[in-house]
Amino acid sequence: MSLGQSLQQRQLQRLSPQQIQLMKLLQVPTAQIEQRVKEELEENPALEMNADLLEGDMEQSVEEMKDDLLEGNQDEEEAIPVDEFEMSNEELSNYDFDDDEVANYKTKDDYYPELDNDKVIPIKAELSLHEILMDQLSMLALEEQAYKIAEQIIGSLDDDGYLRRALQSIADDLAFKQSLTVEVSEIESILLKVQQFDPAGIGARNLQECLLLQLKRKKEEAEEIEEDTLLAIAVIEKYFEEFTRKHYDKIQKSLQLDEVQIKKVLHQIVSLNPKPGAETGTMSEADKYIIPDFTVLINNAKLELTLNSRNAPPLVISDDYKLMLREYDRGNKQDKAQKEAVFFLKQKIDAAKWFIEMILQRQQTLLKTMNAILIHQEAFFMSGDTTKLKPMILKDIAEKTSLDVSTVSRVANSKYVQTEFGTFLLKYFFSESLTTDSGEEVSTKEVKAILEELLESEDKHKPFSDDELTEQLQEKGYNIARRTVAKYREQLNIPVARLRKEL
């Protein structure tokens, strides 16, 4: 066996630190951008908010900026595509400080004073599921080891309130992380205590146990035990598989129930909560607010796009730092202390300039992307009719904006637009195409909307099968296969006909 060397040439695409940071900034929601700016202001004294711009009139409208971005009438420096953007490492002494100010963009507040971006209605803040359960745990008189076991169980629950981990795995966690040797039986006895906490059904290991916990709690708390509750417990304990498959006739026959009784029992079960942990305040702080990044309004039969003012903070380089740098530059360059001071000032000013550029690039990228979507889906924004959505994939917008597909994806997956017909995640407007019998390409969203209408209007005693749905869509001119109908139905979270059937 011989060893040899060979020369290979490969083309690799590497992102600069600035590009990476820009990608991260693009994903920051409007509700958090102020916090991100605040953090940067605290870390870098060379960066400041321009109070005059905060209080004064802004000069350039978003409409003007939108036109610039669309037509390419920007300065060469501003026209650099986001995905090719790279900051220069030029010495700060060569910068023209008078050009450092952030461009002033008019935002929604300036056009529509009645729509104040800062006056958002927050979703009610709640304690997290973990906090709720830990509060209840603190009220139990448990020994230290039992308390730690309960704490480990609570920490192992998922967002829906289920304990998906095996008890042996929890025992292993306690042994490795807390040096506690406990038996699975001891963990199970503590789990029974946790399962008595509110909300009812918490700590279940599967859906069957979750429903049983809720029914048994209902039985314990009732002044008089209802027969329907007892029958519901019997159904979940003995006929759970038949219940999940909606084989109600088998349950009815086995328990010798009449039609009125079986309906009451089923009503008891379907009124339970299959995800007891999901309704508690498990949202992160950022998720407690949905603040639209854009607003699209119809004005004189024309669409007007505006950017939320929170996305355009008026950041500037500190005058004090610029003055100090000039003074040090005029000083003794051979002095070590002077050199260190100049280096520090340049570092801070460089970082401030870089952050301002990143915020500007973020604004431009958001507007370029949203404007391209607005043009492509104009019919929907004018009417709110889902069937007027055109097929549109990430590549379509990437080509129109000269942005990378990954950049468009980041914007689409994290930004919201407020319209006269509701607030939408930008991702909502993307869909693939499907060809009709006439050869016209339509959005799959249009097909799904019609599919939903068919399912809503069906006779629930005799729901449509996927074959019947396919036939009806084909009669309407949509060239679609049965497996595609089944896929769309699943994407709409609608079960098969057998599970949609009602008595």
Image (tube, grey):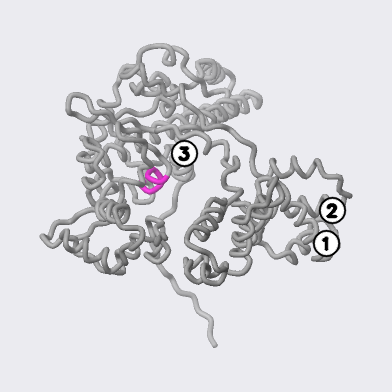
Q: Main secondary structure of the magenta part?
A: helix
Q: How far apart are marks 3 and 2 (CA)?
A: 45 Å
Residue type highlighted by circle 1: Glu
Q: Using residue 205 as the reference point, say whether residue 433 is left or right of it.
A: left
Labels 3 and 2 touching (C-beta < 8 A): no
Question: In front: mark 1 or mark 3?
Answer: 1
Position of residue 258 relative to residue 369, above or below, is below
Quadrant of the rendered structure where residue 175 is? bottom right
Position of residue 198 measured from the top left corner of the image (x, y, whole percent): 68, 45
Labels 2 and 1 touching (C-beta < 8 A): yes
Q: Name the residue under label 1.
A: 186
Q: Mark 2 points at which residue?
A: 146
- Nearest the eye: 469 or 490: 469
Q: For the point 40% across and 23% down, which residue is it?
A: 102
Residue 25: assigned label: 3
Q: Which sits earlier in the primary sequence, circle 3 or circle 2? A: 3
Q: In which quarter of the image is the C terminus?
A: bottom left
